[in-house]
């Protein structure tokens, strides 16, 4: 220990760990995570959470979102480890997805999963998807997130009501995930956004058998309210073709 180093007091190690936990949670959850969500997930007192958030904002490790409803990592964090690279979608997989886009009038997105996060490998250029960080942060309210939860991803401790249709109780979410596992298709109708609906089917890697990707069809609730067997069959056939094209 150098002569300038100061010993830590009894409470400082815990405060440091809590601060790092808050920073790590914001980075993992993505832009817009709220103080209430952080407090619930980390089981910290609200006063402690707000104090640590204010400190991290003051030191520019975090920033407040423009609407003041959440937080994101700041300039002192961004770039330390570099952004997670999004794998390039194989040309053959892109061809399969493009062919599906040519047959239906909805937005069609190919998404991937890594370490509990959702990212888009082939988003529909004509129908921009919801920000992947939002889907990762609220898996209970999205079709892509429900597929991940149905595969065994740990359930969120807090199930916020994003709309009046959002599933907000463990029992209702568990029943929905049972249905997803039984039918092999997930859906959300106005649960994430009152003007948005989505269907998603899993793509399991032929090499590993794990959930590697998902194919999602998105549109307005009135147009996607009754998808019909033809659309569902097209989705499942496309997902089957993709199994040998994803890792």
Image (cartoon, rainbow, N blue to C red):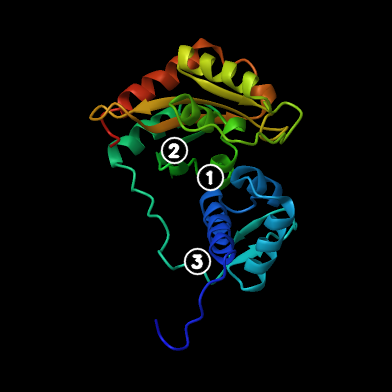
- The reply to whether residue 224 is visible in this rendering is no
Task: In this rendered view, identify the residue nearer to me: 6 or 210.
Answer: 6
Inter-mark Cα distance, 1 to 2: 9 Å
Count of numbered circles on the image: 3
- Quarter of the image holding residue 203? top left
Estimate the x, y position of residue 7 in percent, counting from the top left: 50, 76
Residue 41, labelled with which disc?
none
Mark toward the start of the polypeptide (2 vs 3): 3
Q: Name the residue under label 2.
A: 111
Snapshot quadrant of residue 97? top left
Q: In this view, does 202 lie above or below 212?
A: above
Can see residue 21?
Answer: yes
| Pointer 1 with pointer 2, Cβ within 8 A | yes
Q: Mark 1 points at which residue?
A: 132
Indicate the position of residue 217 as horizontal and vertical percent values. 52, 29
Label 2 crowding class (10 Å Cα cut-off): few <14, some 14-19, many 20+?
many
**Element carrying mark 1:** helix
């Amino acid at each position: 220990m150098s002569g300038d180093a100061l010993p830590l007091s009894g409470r400082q190690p815990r405060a440091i760990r809590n601060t790092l936990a808050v920073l790590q949670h914001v980075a993992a959850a993505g832009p817009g995570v709220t103080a209430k969500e952080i407090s619930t997930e980390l089981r910290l007192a609200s006063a402690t959470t707000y104090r640590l958030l204010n400190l991290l904002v003051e030191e520019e490790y975090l920033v407040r979102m423009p609407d003041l409803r959440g937080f994101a990592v700041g300039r002192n964090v961004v770039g330390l480890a570099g952004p997670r690279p999004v794998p390039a979608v194989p040309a053959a997989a892109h061809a399969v997805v493009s062919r599906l886009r040519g047959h239906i009038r909805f937005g069609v997105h190919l998404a991937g999963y890594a370490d509990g996060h959702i990212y888009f490998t082939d988003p529909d250029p004509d129908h921009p998807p919801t920000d992947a960080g939002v889907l990762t942060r609220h898996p209970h309210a999205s079709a892509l997130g429900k597929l991940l939860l149905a595969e065994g991803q740990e359930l969120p401790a807090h199930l916020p009501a994003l709309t009046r249709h959002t599933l907000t109780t463990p029992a209702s979410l568990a029943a929905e995930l049972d249905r997803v596992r039984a039918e092999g298709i997930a859906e959300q109708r106005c649960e994430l956004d009152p003007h948005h609906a989505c269907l998603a089917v899993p793509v399991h890697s032929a090499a590993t058998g794990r959930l590697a990707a998902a194919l999602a069809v998105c549109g307005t609730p009135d147009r996607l309210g009754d998808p019909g067997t033809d659309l569902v069959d097209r989705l499942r056939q496309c997902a089957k073709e993709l199994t040998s094209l994803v890792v």
